[in-house]
Image: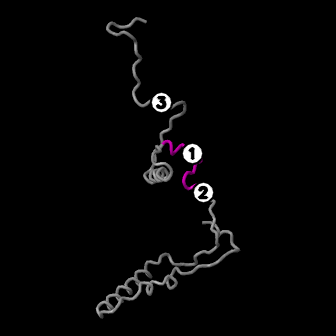
Amino acid sequence: MVNPPGQDTLQPKKRRGPAPTGIGTPIQVRLQPDDLELLDLWIAANDPDMSRPEAMRRILRGERGADAEMSRSRRKTPIVGVTSAASDKRFKKAEHGRERAAVRVTIDQGEEPPAAKQFGDPWKGEKDGKLYRPDDPRHLRK
């Protein structure tokens, strides 16, 4: 090969874009926002510096990451909650209102306010039940 005039050596033309990552089939995946959010949460829980493609590779390989040991964890005592109530919000709101009213009255009378423990007893709420179930292994799972 003969070099063109003005050039001492021939240099190959540079390729555009990032350097190739190796042998393999590139796959483009379109993720919906909720799936993308789940992927980002997985990355944040495992390695915040990890790229999205690397996270997808690890998930495909079955590397579960930070939550891997949770599936095997067991309770030490088989005590479970017994309730049909969805929330304690109504009970707590009423008890806090009752406490504020009592404190307001005692301050107006110049007396010492009542102790906070007198209000909001969790055993009087809708979600108060606990049950000891040593015979049922389902209750030992966390």
The answer to whether the residues at label 3 and label 2 have Cβ atoms under 8 Å apart is: no
Establish if 139 lies above or below 59: below
Q: Residue furthest bottom?
A: 109
Residue 60 rendering spot, x and y as whole percentages: 57, 45
What's the amino acid at mark 1? Leu
Q: Nearer the viewer, residue 31 or 139?
A: 139
| 7 horizontally vs 121: left or right | left
Q: CA distance from mark 3 to mark 1?
A: 21 Å
Residue 85 rendering spot, x and y as whole percentages: 51, 78
Query: In the rendered image, which residue does mark 1 sit on?
Result: 60
| 112 horizontally vs 141: left or right | left
Please give the name of the residue rendered at 62% of the width and 75% of the height, measured from the top-left corner: 79
What's the amino acid at mark 2? Glu
SS state under label 3: loop
Establish if 104 lies above or below 25: below
Magenta stretch, residue numbers: 53-70
Query: In the rendered image, which residue does mark 3 sit on?
Result: 20
